[in-house]
Amino acid sequence: MSITFKHVDYTYQAGTPLATPALQDINLHVPDHGYLAIIGHTGSGKSTLIQQLNALLKPTRGELTIDAFTVTPTTTNADLKPLRQHVGMVFQFPESQLFEETIQQDIAFGPQNFGMAPDAARQLADEMLTTVGLDPSYAQRSPFDLSGGQMRRVAIAGVLAMHPQVLVLDEPTAGLDPQGRQEMMALFDRLHREQGLTIVLVTHQMEDVAQYADQVAVMRQGRLLKTGTPREIFGDPDWLRANDLDVPRATKFAQKLAQQGVHWPQGLPLTADELAAQLAAQWPQGGAADV
Amino acid sequence: MAQIIQVQQLSYEYPESTGHAALDQVSFDVEQGEWLAIVGHNGSGKSTLARAIDGLLPFKQGSITVGGVALTPATVWTVREQIGMIFQNPDNQFVGATVEDDVAFGLENRQLSREEMVPRVQQALQAVGMQDFAHREPSSLSGGQKQRVALAGIVAIAPQILILDEATSMLDPRGRQDMLALVRQLHQQQHLTVISITHDIDEAAQADRVLVIDDGHLVQEAPPATIFAQGSRLVALGLDVPFTTKLADALRQRGITPPDGYQTTAEMEAWLCRSLLNT
């Protein structure tokens, strides 16, 4: 499913003396099967922006189109049910939303709420456990006996059970250990590649942006400052730093080498692998590219 | 240097676990003024260990001595006075309605007079750079600001030991860097002993010594550079592979051989410049 924002404004408590503009004139297009990363400082409007995607918040001006659905300031909640089924939201620390007695019941809750028969929903729940990399034997256990990383997988299985076509992820790896982070990002990448899900990822992890996203949106003070490929965005580290944002480790390292006189003919590298490849190409002797 | 903490043959099993020890005969010492990092993957037992030192765990086997006092149910309050602890989730540790009330809480518990309390709260907030937020509600702060207020609460009571239990893991990169810089400053200026339980390689790199806990056992004890030299095995230990190690591996795959062992960013940069630019 593709996503298009057209001149979207959003104001908290609009029409009251406490009105606070949170989004201003957002124009953005994410193609079907796209992978968008949204970066920006705490308070820049990232979370407000993604809450538009399943119309938890509706624009106060402008319109948002997701495939055949259009959300405008006057769209009613009754019109939104099909949209919400297609857009899966994984909020920060989603494990805090688990509540059922067994893992199977927790995952089956969403589909049953949308009218699926209990038997079918339970079967679906078991399939989803496998999808998120948990053993099906977990189905009858309590979600509260699991580790933090496992609980988060269960919460994500609950979202995937709705068969969303867009998956919106708000800092999905925060608080996990490095191995858990890697596994979680690999899971989303697999869903993106194998099932064609459109992914919208809010993150502070620039390494993940460089590795997985094909489009980056930079937010600041409620405005969309820039969009581009990771290469375009990270190709200007000074601009990012001026906007209080980081660049991937490899890019930072390459920039330091550049200050010492090392050249990057193919542009600043984004990963350790690209960095090594460009170094090998200009290595004085014995480097692979010399022969 | 004096040993401020001695842990000997400490074992612990959670009541609901069947025969599986969360800690199994763990022994180590911490020197006064040392910065010790404890690493291990999720569920390895490292947080259990921190809780045991703070007297939050009724262990039955082994002993813990803090500042010369053996930890028992009778001495737990004396021991805790020497320790300040910051947990992972900044939202779980606020009690005050305003930032300054929260910082004053520990002092109130120690029955300080108002005359003594007011300047100490102000100084503590200044030490963490949060003096302008004294009258704010804690809920209106960012995660990084909340952890700094938690740190101010500890600065105010001036304990000997600070335990950080994944205290930076929920912060954004900027918040993490600020918090670490602040802890480093307190460590140096106030000779604070720091124990940091962490998954963050930059945080572990600050330590004088790293303990690796795996499945309740103490499996390794070494300076950060020795720990970091283990390359991809670090992921199994709950840490990330350092960037310089990833780069060294990628170079080796292309027939270029960097120096052996763990290289800091500056060492790697210097070596590459020498090799490429003949300087």
Image (spheres, coloured by chain):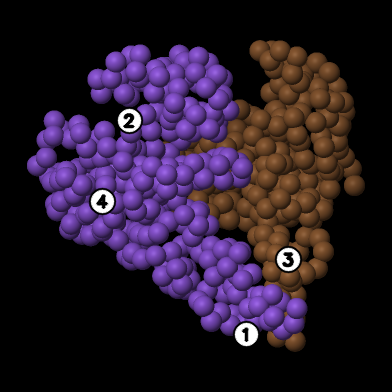
Chain colours: A purple, B brown
Q: Which of marks 1 and 4 is nearer the N terminus?
A: 4
Evaluate whether label 3 is on the same chain as label 4. Answer: no
Q: Subunit of mark 4? A: A
Tell me, yes or no, whether the two marked residues, 2 and 3, touch with CB atoms within 8 Å. Answer: no
Crowding around mark 2 (Cα neighbors within 10 Å: few <14, some 14 to 19, many 20+) is many
Residues at marks 2 and 4, CA–CA distance in whole angstroms = 18 Å
Q: Subunit of mark 1? A: A
Instruction: Mark yes or no: residue B139 visible.
Output: yes
Q: In this view, does B194 lie to the left or right of B154?
A: right
Q: Give the label on residue A162, or none.
A: 2
Name the residue that disc number 4 marks: A2
Name the residue that disc number 3 marks: B252
Q: Subunit of mark 2? A: A
Residue A269, image x, y percentages: 54, 70
Q: Quadrant of residue A8?
A: bottom left
B233, above or below A84, in the image: below
Residues at marks 3 and 1, CA–CA distance in whole angstroms = 23 Å
